[in-house]
Image (spheres, grey):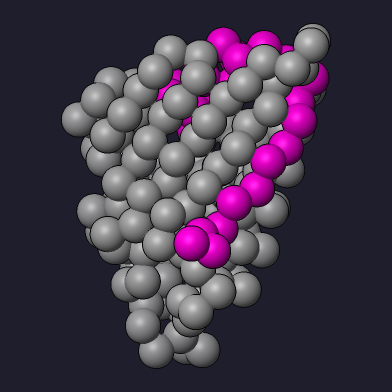
Amino acid sequence: MNDYTKTIEVSTTPHRVYEALTHSIPLWWSALFTGSSSAIGDVFTIRFGDHIHKTFKVEEMIPDSKVAWYVEDSLIALPELKNQTEWIGTTVVWEIVKKENNALIKVTHIGLRPAVECYEICSTGWVQFLGSLKQFLETGKGSPYEK
């Protein structure tokens, strides 16, 4: 249904990907992280400065193969956006597949579609932080947002 989807291949194991998505979010996405992301029902918030935040509830976890987060709250306070809460009610699904000696990571942001006002800004952000996730998994050091 035209939801944002991107697949990347990473030189690592599915287990390390799963661990990065459940225990290491501040090391590749945003160092401004509060809460917990390691169990179903956990809630966590990531911030990008004082004007952008997203609060997720962990909805699904299948070890080494899938993680899903529901967006409970979000604010993208950028002047060019009329609707600054578009992420609320969307879901981010991570699927992990072993491919030879690598792992494929497919992220689907259900509800982030081209018709959504922040699509260009948000899809560019996803590309940036997926790159950081890949870097973190392959080198041990990502490029998360840091204030």
Is residue 128 magenta-colored? no
Residue depicted at x 35% and y 40%? 69
Q: Quadrant of residue 134?
A: top right
- Name the quadrant of the C terminus: bottom right
The one nearer the camera, 119 or 50, is 119
Magenta segment, which residues?
A: 1-25
The spot of residue 139 in percent (x, y) is: 78, 22
The spot of residue 137 in percent (x, y) is: 69, 23
- The number of numbered discs placed on residues in the rendered structure image is 0
The spot of residue 116 in percent (x, y) is: 46, 76
Q: Give the side of residue 11 with respect to residue 76, left or right.
A: right
The spot of residue 86 in percent (x, y) is: 36, 71
Q: Is residue 129 above or below residue 119?
A: above
Q: Is residue 65 above or below residue 122?
A: above
Residue depicted at x 75% and y 26%? 10
Question: Can the viewer see residue 136 in this picture?
Answer: no
Residue placed furthest toward the left: 41
Question: Can the viewer see residue 105 in this picture?
Answer: yes
Q: Give the side of residue 136 with respect to residue 24, left or right.
A: right
The one nearer the camera, 147 or 57, is 57
Q: Quadrant of residue 67?
A: top left
Q: Give the side of residue 24 with respect to residue 44, left or right.
A: right
Is residue 13 magenta-colored? yes
Residue depicted at x 56% and y 11%? 15
The one nearer the camera, 86 or 129, is 86
Residue depicted at x 72% and y 37%? 8
Q: Is residue 139 above or below residue 81?
A: above
